[in-house]
Image (cartoon, rainbow, N blue to C red):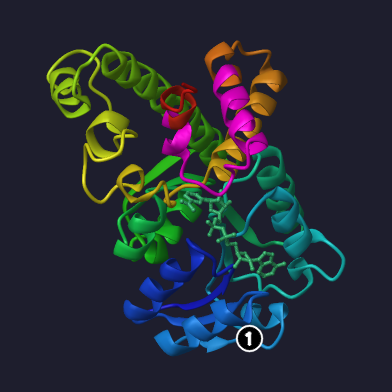
Amino acid sequence: MAKVGFIGLGNMGGPMAINLVKAGHEVTVFDLSDTAMAQLKEAGAALADKISDVCADADFVVSMLPAGKHVRAIFTGEDGLVNYLDKKTLVIDSSTIDAESAQFVGKALALVGISFVDAPVSGGVAGAAAGTLTFIVGGSETNFDKAKTVLSHMGKNIFHAGEIGAGQVAKICNNMLLSILMAGTSEALQLGVDHGLDAKVLSDIMLASSGRNWTLELYNPCPDVLPNVPSSNGYKPGFMVDLMAKDLGLAQQAAQQTNSATPMGALAKNLYNLMQNQGKGSEDFSAIFKLYSEKKG
Ligand code: NAD
């Protein structure tokens, strides 16, 4: 078993770190939130007094932070961890951030001989708790193999997408497609409902037809079609509108860099920004259904 430092114990990082403790790793954690730290203490992790303490003799340091600016600041900012990490440590950043930040941090660490992979995840809070996340890794073959020592205790599917940053690119491609499917599924379901169809019957028909997709099957955005999904629970997240809007911003940023045409992604970003402007940023991303279903009169 390995010695692991873990930074960022939020909705995702908390349960991920708990799974590492359960698997028998020696885990030292740090978060700005005392509540998050207390949860991990109860689960059996050691608490770091200050962030640099997670580096002490660590085989791995895993980070699960909100955005690129946090990852850059923690590793390469003033008094960053680059000054404290040991050369034997592999840094695994699982946050969803822009590929450029991942490459920037990877290069800064490489300059002092420290290995890095980006390893963003898919599978949400439920997958984090169940240890069934999908990890999408960017980095060298050697570091990919090494990372599996800990990733396999937090996830089920572990993919090697390419060099550093490739994990982030694959992740935003997936989330851009997911948002488009969610918007399209909502639009089609509401059109049927407006014409008197039952949403569950229509869902069953489309699931057996060519419109079948993940959102329709496992995350239906229309309330009461499926049990135990956010739409049947007041659109409590799940995966927040704010996070989807962030990922769609990253996708557009990536598209600009390569002059790639992403008109559907741009439209999806606009729809999710509209939801944020309507105060729905903290709702689940399937609440986009309400853009179609909530009508006056
Ligand atoms: P979150 O806001 O719940 O957790 C982030 C944690 O980081 C918080 O506990 C915060 O206190 C901590 N943090 C921030 N700055 C810090 C610092 N300087 N030092 C120490 N701790 C610090 O977010 P989350 O939902 O856990 O998401 C984390 C990442 O995972 C994001 O990049 C998100 O896009 C990605 N992600 C989230 C989901 C999801 O369903 N929530 C799914 C896939 C990927």
SS type, badge 1: loop
Q: Position of residue 114 (x, y in %)?
A: 66, 62
Vertical placement of residue 30 versus 49, above or below: above
Residue at x-position 65% and y-position 32%: 249
Crowd band around label 1 with a 10 angstrom C-alpha radius: few (<14), some (14–19), many (20+): many
Residue depicted at 60% across the width and 56% down the height: 116
* Total numbered labels: 1
Q: Which residues are magenta?
A: 267-289
The relative height of residue 47 versus residue 115 in the rendered view (above or below) is below
Determine the residue located farthest toward the front in the rendered image. Answer: 297
Left or right: where 143 falls relative to 88: left
| Residue 140 in the figure: left or right of residue 152 | right
Magenta highlight: main SS? helix
Say whether residue 287 is magenta: yes
Image position of 233 with respect to 202: above or below? below
Q: Quadrant of ligand 1?
A: bottom right
Q: Magenta span has 49?
A: no
The picture quadrant where one finds residue 272 is top right
Q: Residue furthest right?
A: 78
x and y percentages locating residue 112 in the rendered image: 75, 62
Position in image of residue 259 (x %, y %): 68, 13
Residue at image point 73% right, 62% down: 75
Occupied quadrant, residue 111: bottom right
